[in-house]
Amino acid sequence: MHFDDLLKILGEFGRYQQIRLFLICLVAIVCAFHAMNMVFVGAKPDYKCHVPSVNVSDPIFGNTTEKDFQDFLQSAGKCEIYDAREASKLILSGNYTLDGIKGNNGTVSKSKCTEWDYSRKVYGPTIVTQFDLVCDKDWLRSTSKTLYFFGRLVGAVVFGQLSDILGRKPTLFTCLLMLLIVGSVAAAAPNFYVFIPFYILQGAAQTGLFLVTFTLGTELVGPSYRLVAGFLVQSFYSIGYMTLSVLAYGIRDWRYIELAITLPVVLFVPYIWLLPESVRWLLSKHKEEEVKNIVRKVADTNKVDINEEMLEDLTKSDDKSETETTGRRYTLIDLCRPGMIFLSLNVWFNWLVNAMLYYGLSLGTDNLGGDPYINFCIAGAVEIPAYIMCILMLNPLGRRRPLFATMVVGGGACIASGFIEMIPLKITLAMIGKFCITASYAIIYLMAAEVFPTVVRNIGMGVSSMCARIGGMLAPQILELNRFWGPLPLILFGGLAIFSGALALLLPETSGKPLPQTMEDVTDPEKRKVAEKGIDMTVCSPGTDKDEDILNGK
């Protein structure tokens, strides 16, 4: 008996699964905290060169106040300052007034700032103000975000493998412990060079944690609830997104923000006893007794009677994949063969662009004008209706057309937002773009799991996840282009979204079609036609038990 068949008897989404899924979803909130904290931890407030006190009491200064004199010295720019001694000497010589110097600035030399005064109007202390990541060090701020996404790439690869080798539950607690340690150390970092390696590790732990969380959630329920379970985990991620803006607004200091989002990890210690290991993983490792114990608990909680014969039948299942029966091992090269390469590149490019836009719009909320805390909260709030829309439309409308529509509309909204000066309208258009990109990200994630054949699905999804990390790494660098021209990042984001959406029309429609099992199901048109006459696949069932270990794009 296949586990999915047994779940139909036990209850695909019974009380046991409902309680555990809720507990799993709570972890997604903490994942969102650590995915987005750089928006506030690395925020760059307004700043000016620091000017020491200047004595302007001499009558020759006239009505010039100390503030007037300091404003003049700072008018050289944010990274340079006029020499205070030279300016004072000119005035004291009687040859210049302050207005005269202003009219002929070339008479006073400039020097680079070594200290800065930071505005506390919007943000409290951040790593920018703490470590002076401005002017010559400004590149370190955007680089820190890119390095964080590099850490996430490493985390996706390392913890994805560990979850397959060690199990979902040990990997979950490894990531939680790692997040607690590196987050706490990062909060206490005395300088940027201590902070950044632990911040990279924080990115790796966060990605590993969300990967395992999503996998546990989807493996817990039956086939007809798998899509709903996945979107529930994503929705709690969005709740964490919104909650972060409230925490950041109330706390302000970056060190305490780091601690506030890290220490709640301790609350998950009881999960050692509350959460079970994935039955699907246990079955793949032939751990029969553990499987039987968990299934008995599920049956007891869901008030369903099962007999020992069912359990024996379940643990003796000898379903084998094509790889096991033929001895053939598939690699990345198989995804790059004729007939597959254009499909693979199309999917991977869509993942890269979707991740780039998702994180570009999330990290760039402070560039829209208005209150950055409110903007960030709205950007998180629009994700929930986007997921609901996906659940409602993916069955009747399919995958390809909604993917095309959301990317084109989202891209158009981004471009339009770049040219709008009216702040409320600018924010509205940016949020429309965020709504659409959130939806398209969810669609391409599901669609990718359905277009790759079973024998290479994990490989294809693994590369897709890596492409998403690269897109995330590029997003902070593209946002920095606004120093050359304000609308440029949004124009690039929007243009890439429209182009990627157009390419999506070349992908095969997967809704209501059987999942391709072999390479020939995709590369041989005749075989594909025959396969499509078979049993329709369930929208929520991305494949065999081994195929449940799909990495989430966030």
Image (cartoon, rainbow, N blue to C red):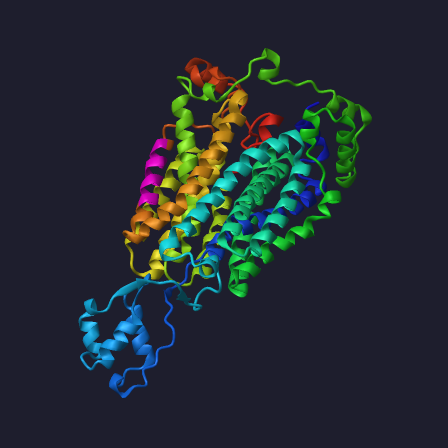
Residue at the extreme top of the image, as rendered: 326
Q: Is residue 226 left or right of residue 529?
A: right
Residue 58, compared with residue 413, is above or below; it is below
Q: Is residue 77 left or right of residue 5?
A: left
Q: Is residue 150 visible?
A: yes
Give x and y (percent) for residue 204. 55, 41
Label total for image: 0
Residue 77, compared with residue 513, is above or below; it is below
Residue at the extreme bottom of the image, as rendered: 59
Assess whether residue 292 is covered by the magenta stretch. no
Q: Is residue 389 visible?
A: no
Asked whether 497 or 123 is in front, the reply is 123
Asked whether 472 or 323 is in front, the reply is 472
Give x and y (percent) for residue 221. 65, 36
Residue at the (40%, 27%) spot, across then down: 345
Asked whether 468 or 72 is in front, the reply is 72
Residues in magenta, as a range: 492-503
Give x and y (percent) for residue 503. 35, 31
Q: Toward which corner of the image does residue 8 lie, by quadrant? A: top right
Residue at the (36%, 28%) spot, across then down: 506
Q: Quadrant of the N terminus?
A: top right
Give x and y (percent) for residue 126. 48, 60
Asked whether 197 or 509 is in front, the reply is 197
Assess whether residue 500 is covered by the magenta stretch. yes
Q: Main secondary structure of the magenta part?
A: helix
